[in-house]
Image (cartoon, rainbow, N blue to C red):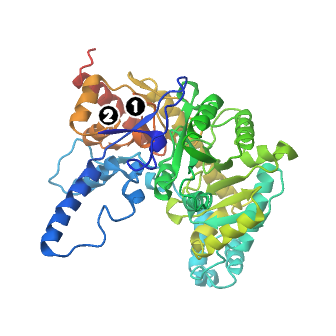
Amino acid sequence: MTAINLVSLCRLRTSRLMGPLPVTCKVLTVQFVDEGLRELHTRHHSNRSSQKRSGGGKVLTVSSINQNLVNLRYEVRGKVANRADELRRELKDPAVVKPFAKVVEANIGNPHAMKQLPISFFRQVLALCVDPALLDYEGLPYARDVKERARRTLECLKGHGIGAYTASVGVTEFRKDIARFIEERDGYKADYRNIFLTNGASDAIRSILTLCIPGSTNKCAPKVGYMSPIPQYPLYSACYSELGVEMIPYYLDEDNNWELNMDNLGQAIESARLQCEPRLLVVINPGNPTGQQLSRVNIEQIIKFCHAKRLVLLADEVYQENAYKENSEFVSFRKVLKSMGPQYSNLELVSFHCVSKGYVGECGVRGGYMELVGIDPSVVEVLERYLNSKLCANTVGQIMTDLMINPPKPGDESYPQFAKERSGILTSLKKAAATISSRLDTIDGIQCSEIQGAMYAFPNIYLPPMAIAKAKEDCLGPDEYYCLKLLEETGISFVPGSGFGQINGTYHFRTTTLADEETTEDMLDRLEQFHRKFLTEHGVKR
């Protein structure tokens, strides 16, 4: 078991640790299991010995490849998720007996895998674009506006269909549609030339993180640092590891529903300046994994902070349709920035959205976009050249993105069905969020904040000393030990909180809020029974 200060998360064993955080700031550690690394290196050294004896060897070994990738971790698909996959295969064998009939995939935000149905209009248009010959089939039971939209989409592809490359930055007409969507959402004009279609938000985020690394021939220059919330979506720490930049953690306030505390933000950047050059700030709103929704006041504070500290602001807003907080609708960072006047017009902001979340849930389609605001035109040009090297985002994802931001309107033939499906999905997700957070909070030894948005709960769980000691014996993190035991006994797959970052000495897990009502109630029942049993077995007297 290795405890690593999260400031060095992205470099793990290869980078310098930052100096101690201020006394007033909680010290954060994230626990990682490095048994896999030790096994890889042991195997490598064994192979190297045999290679010396044979006089040859492999060019690629664990120690000769990119160490940033060797050290990369993405716990959403880590040890617990891998074991869940194994259990699914085992359950197919009639001879295998388990105390559960199926594995509940509550570890990843994958709506359609949890039986969320696709939007009919979107899939019908997509079907016609994939097979345009269907447009001439008289017996096709599709509404008129479905066919019209498919024809318009195929025209936007210049008649080449979905199998041809598009412009590297995306189909021009789709970019213009996104600009209109942003204008209607925020009330401020958007320039389609600053909008780029990508293979989901993850691809866009990775591109911007790559772009923001400063070029320097000075080997003594400080490393660049990227500020990220803790807990955070592991995509960011994985990208930092891949790119070799320092992660600067700032801590969300669990005692206040995971609010972004400006004092923590200030302390984080001042401590980081001793070791690296802070370059950008990442904000996830609504939050993953914490489910908080930022207030307009909080957004203004963050914008002012980035302006004062000369930081590029990255706004991950892929859950903007999943905003459940009463009397508080989602407000984009772009809208707030535009409303704050010309003194903040030079702030550099990049916003992200995608089709994987919200009511669409088309994770496998891989569609999304980013919008650049206040970025120097010469830098935008460099980004375009970089995207040229990727050829283009997949056409199906581009079409789905265009459908998401330009769905049927009132008066369209398909609108009543679309509105019913959209409302049904969002109402169900909101109800599930309320049910899960309130129910978790009633279980002895579990505390859960209100889920205000996104599609996750991130409850705090009490783990007794005996459980922590047993986890250490098994070379596991305490919350990883808990989640593996839960999986083996109930078939419920959660993600250990250590995969997202957490205050040292606290333990969490992340669960999605995507399962249907029956599955959710059954999952919560089994979790409660397991948790009580777990505490008793690990020395808690009742």
Q: Is residue 504 above or below residue 182?
A: above
**Residue 140 visible in the snapshot:** no
Residue 479: x %, y % from top left? 34, 35
User: Which image quadrant is residue 510 in?
Assistant: top left
Question: Residue 462: where, in percent of width, then height?
Answer: 37, 25
Which badge, 1 or 2, is on the more N-terminal residue?
Answer: 2
The extreme left residue here reads: 53
| Rendered residue at 64%/74% (across/down) | 168
- Residue found farthest to the right: 342
Residue positioned 69% across, 62% down in the render: 414
Helix, strand or loop at mark 1? loop
The crowd level at tag 2 (other Cα within 10 Å; few <14, some 14-19, many 20+) is many
Q: Amino acid at mark 2?
A: Pro
Residue 366, label in figure:
none
Q: Is residue 379 visible?
A: yes
Q: Please give the residue where the numbered disc 1 appears in the rendered image.
A: 507
The location of residue 458, given as percent across then percent down, is 47, 35
Residue type highlighted by circle 1: Tyr
Please indicate whether residue 233 sits to the left or right of residue 402 in the image: left
Left or right relative to 480: residue 246: right
Question: At 74% across and 33% down in the image, what residue appears?
Answer: 297
- The residue at which mark 2 appears reads as 478
Note whether 10 is above or below 213 in the view shown: above
Label 2: state its secondary structure.
Answer: helix
Judge the density around disc 1: few (<14), some (14-19), many (≥20) Cα neighbours within 10 Å: many
Which is nearer the eye, 496 or 375?
375
Viewport quadrant of the N terminus: top left
Mark 1 and mark 2 in contact? Answer it, CB < 8 Å: yes
How far is the residue under mark 1 from the one under mark 2? 7 Å
Compared with residue 383, is residue 213 higher up or lower down, i.e. above or below? Answer: above
Residue 534, position as x, y percentages in the image: 27, 28
